[in-house]
């Protein structure tokens, strides 16, 4: 019995010792595996964060749209008239617009029917289509340096086309000076006077059209040289005036010719009557 007890005791002691040895020997391996796992988790987490930040676009689509509208209405007609082409370094160049490709893939059918040109999905409002672009087609954005037209809104008076209460907005001299400086830098970079007469003419027009209004005096208004809307209105008014005056002109000619014809016939009758009178 004593021998059996001794054998069992020795077996328990050996088992316990073996367990301790195995634990001690495996501890560095467990620690190393845990460290590798944490490093992998950290790497994956950093990659996910990088992808998330890469997909973020810190540029206002609405203000970029307003800037594009200002350029198309109040600058492009004069640029086309001079047959002038923006250089790629000019921030007003059509290619320097992060949302340009997406905007060109908007299909407007009617007021409540907007369609995606990429996947043909239909939306009831334009804002929902914009959200769709952000969620599904953000990989198609032209992301690069200085491609956000919204950054030029201060120089281009975007608020004038976005806000009906623009004229009553409080003016801050420091902000006006900053916007004027940005405006003049755009004029210098896009319409360098050294490029010739067309560039010089457009440089002067850009200063009067946009930069001179960056003042708190209130004397100068933006877009003083007019734009596409005004030109279209004047052409429409001129056409309507011609349509009204043309029938009046022809009526006047008809009356004059009728009057002259009547007088000619009367003179002929008088002349014939004079010849028929017998001599006394």
Image (tube, grey):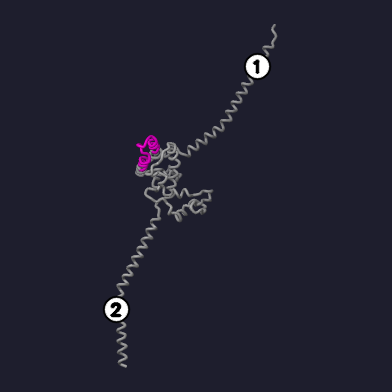
> Of helix, strand and loop, which one carries label 2?
helix
Q: Residue at x 46, y 53 (%)?
A: 133
Magenta part of the chain: 182-206
State how far apart marks 2 and 1 are (Cα): 145 Å
**Residue 196 among magenta residues:** yes
In the displayed structure, would residue 54 be above or below residue 216? below
Rendering coords of residue 129 (x, y %): 48, 52
- Which tag is nearer the camera, tag 2 or tag 1? 2
Q: Residue at x 39, y 36 (%)?
A: 198
Residue located beneath label 1 in the image:
268
List the single residue furthest toward the bottom.
Answer: 1
Q: Quadrant of residue 262?
A: top right
* Residue 67 or residue 192, whichever sits in front: 192
Crowding near pointer 2: few (<14 within 10 Å), some, many (20+)?
few
Residue located beneath label 2 in the image:
21
Crowding near pointer 1: few (<14 within 10 Å), some, many (20+)?
few
Q: Residue at x 61, y 23 (%)?
A: 257
Q: Main secondary structure of the magenta part?
A: helix
Q: Quadrant of residue 56?
A: bottom left
Q: Is residue 240 left or right of residue 216?
A: right
Q: Quadrant of residue 227?
A: top left
**Residue 244 among magenta residues:** no
Specify the label residue 111 is tagged with: none
Q: Is residue 91 visible?
A: yes
* Residue 115 or residue 181, whichever sits in front: 115
In the displayed structure, would residue 13 be above or below residue 198? below
Rendering coords of residue 155 (x, y %): 39, 43
Q: Total number of numbered labels?
A: 2
For marks 2 and 1 on the same chain, the one whose residue lies earlier in the sequence? 2
């Amino acid at each position: 019995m004593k021998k059996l007890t001794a054998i069992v005791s020795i077996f328990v002691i050996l088992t316990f010792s073996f367990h301790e040895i195995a634990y001690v020997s495996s501890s560095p391996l467990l620690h190393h595996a845990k460290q590798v796992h944490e490093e992998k988790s950290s790497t994956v987490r950093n990659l996910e964060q990088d992808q998330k930040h890469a997909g973020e676009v810190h540029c206002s689509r609405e203000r970029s749209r307003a800037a594009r509208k200002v350029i198309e209405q109040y600058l492009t007609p004069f640029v086309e008239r001079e047959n002038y082409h923006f250089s790629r370094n000019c921030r007003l160049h059509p290619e320097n617009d992060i949302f340009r490709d997406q905007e060109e893939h908007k299909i407007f059918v009617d007021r409540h029917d907007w369609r995606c040109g990429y996947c043909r999905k239909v939306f009831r409002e334009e804002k929902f289509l914009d959200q769709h672009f952000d969620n599904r087609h953000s990989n198609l954005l032209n992301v690069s340096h200085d491609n956000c037209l919204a950054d030029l809104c201060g120089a281009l008076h975007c608020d004038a086309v976005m806000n009906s209460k623009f004229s009553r907005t409080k003016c801050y001299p420091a902000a006006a000076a900053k916007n004027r400086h940005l405006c003049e830098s755009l004029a210098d970079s896009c319409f360098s006077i050294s490029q010739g007469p067309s560039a010089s003419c457009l440089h002067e027009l850009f200063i009067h059209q946009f930069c001179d209004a960056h003042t708190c005096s209130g004397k100068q208004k933006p877009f003083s040289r007019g734009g596409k809307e005004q030109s279209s209105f004047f052409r429409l008014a001129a056409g309507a005036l011609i349509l009204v005056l043309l029938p009046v002109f022809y009526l006047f000619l008809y009356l004059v010719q009728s009057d002259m014809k009547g007088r000619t016939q009367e003179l002929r009758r008088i002349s014939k009557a004079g010849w028929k009178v017998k001599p006394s």
